[in-house]
Amino acid sequence: MLPAVARGAVPVAGLRWWVLAVAAGWQASVRAVAAPWGAPFARRGLGARRPVGHSAGRRFGRHAQQCVQRTAAMPPANRGANCKISCYNGNSGFAVNAAAANAHVGRLIWKESLIMELRELSIDRIHRAFSPAKEIQNPELFVGRKEEIRKGMAALMTKGGFLAILGLRGVGKSSIAYQIKLIAEGNDRLPKLLDLARFLPRKRFNYIVHYIRCDNFVRDIPTLLKRILFGDENNPSLFSLTKAGERQALEFKKVLEAQIGGNIIAAQASVKGSEEIRYAPYISDDLIGQFRQVLGMVTKDNWQKRSGLLILIDEFDIVENKRGFGSLIKACSSDFVKFGIVGVGTSISELISDHDSVGRQANIIHVPLMPEHELVHILKRAEHIVGRAITFDEAAQLEIARRSEGFPYFTHLMGKETMLLAFHRRNSLVTLADVQALFTTIVQGNLPTIYEDLYHRAVGNSTQKEILLKILADELQDEIYTKPAYALARELGIKNPTQAMRDLERDGIIIRVRDRYYRFSDPVFKVYARLRNWKE
Ligand SMILES: Nc1ncnc2c1ncn2[C@@H]1O[C@H](COP(=O)(O)OP(=O)(O)OP(=O)(O)O)[C@@H](O)[C@H]1O
Ligand SMILES: [Mg+2]
């Protein structure tokens, strides 16, 4: 009797044709369709492994699904009987057969729909699902960090004040900063996703956000001020936020030119570093005064309509000479104007020497290493983006999370590479073996990444430098004491470890923290250097 099969078999509307296929002799049709794909699925044991974990009541009838689950949990000898008892207790023999058929059809439907999804999956969805090289901008791809985002939202609620986002390199600071920028501008997607919407003000935030990213041209605070004032490729000039706008910008440039006798346009992002130095002495109180004046104009023209002006400065740690920043913040913050910095560091004093002036108004968000369950979540989010046409089995997920050592960069990198591999092989499942194979490729230096380039740059052809690099990378502490490291290096045959260290410092691999203490400028590279095999 057909309805018994149809009742639980196909809840997914798009697959109802399968019911008809069942009536018309489902076994034949399934075999015909599945045959070309059968081998890879059989090899990976997909049919046996997936239905129980994957179900969620979507791919096939709930009844059939329960039956499959219970059956899977039983010793093989009892399976038929148990299925009878648990699923169709008291039903006729036909119903029992129907249930078994139902479950079987469900499995095949599930396989078939996977095949269809895999065929339809376009490779750019995989590229969209991972972002190893860039901070997360799309809230849909942002994972975890609930507490950090909540703190950021709380900082936006307070008038004026100062925000700092601190943490190790590569831990996810810019991603958090970018999400705070979006929230400040009124985007409530992430608060909703993280169940934080209740922390939003009733009238949404509508900050004007100036998100500046420092680079090697921003060597000191005066240059930074000019960058904020005149804008860059991503930000309009502050003057454009005032009613008089461009006219004022021109006047202001004239004033500065008169004061410093040079062309202020050269102060923009495209300028060469050497020219910047020429302007440095002229920052003086005048520039701060002018800056305050412009902020005053922006405030006057916007305070009724906007929540405030948030000037968010990313990569602040790059600025070589940060002198005067604390007093600048103190002088320029107001109920309307809020500053924020994002940078590598464990405390605010590492980034702002005159931090006392910032003092109590600071909201500080420390970003820790990402916990493993959040790293796993990055993979699950990616599965969702590709419509679950390719998924990671549980062991693969855990292995990627464990190997990432708290750095989401590695999760994105390994997740993306293994998923691409599965895509090329037309597999719908990434397994532990796939992850281990990729890991071997990485440690052998066969996956081209920025870190592989950096490894070559760091060690060149010098075995001595490679030995020292490995010794330093093996150190568990973030700050590395040179005495034991040099002693070990000498034991291993390095005649002049101090020179090798100087070379690593010159190349920007290692940073001197204080006398005899160094640390890696990029802790992700520290992990990479530790894991990578020796150069041949
Ligand atoms: N919450 C998150 N969810 C998913 N991926 C994340 C998250 N945070 C960071 N990532 C990923 O981790 C990597 C590093 O992130 P990000 O650039 O934000 O770190 P960072 O601390 O600013 O690094 P740096 O110190 O180099 O500036 C990127 O690949 C990013 O896509
Ligand atoms: Mg960053």
Image: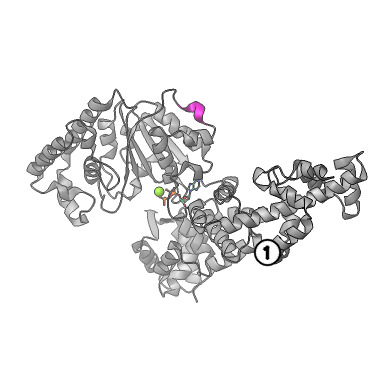
260 magenta-colored:
no
Q: Is residue 477 visible?
A: no
Q: Is residue 58 visible?
A: yes
**Where is residue 171 shown, x and y percent of the image?**
47, 48
Secondary structure at badge 1 equals helix
User: In which quarter of the view is residue 423 placed?
Assistant: bottom right
197 magenta-colored:
yes
Q: Relative to residue 312, is residue 53 drawn left or right?
A: right
Most foreground residue, 172 or 68: 68
> What type is the residue that disc 1 sits on?
Trp
Which residues make up the magenta segment? 196-200
Most foreground residue, 529 or 248: 248
Q: How is the image coloured?
A: one colour
Q: Residue at x 54, y 41 (%)?
A: 144
**Where is residue 378 shown, x and y percent of the image?**
55, 48
Picture quarter with the N terminus: top right
State whether the magenta stretch is mostly helix, strand or loop.
Answer: helix
Most foreground residue, 56 or 535: 56
Q: Relative to residue 224, is residue 479 drawn left or right?
A: right
Q: Which residue is mark 1?
A: 37
**Where is residue 29 shown, x and y percent of the image?**
74, 58
- Distance from mark 1 CB to nearest ligand 1 atom below 8 Å: no
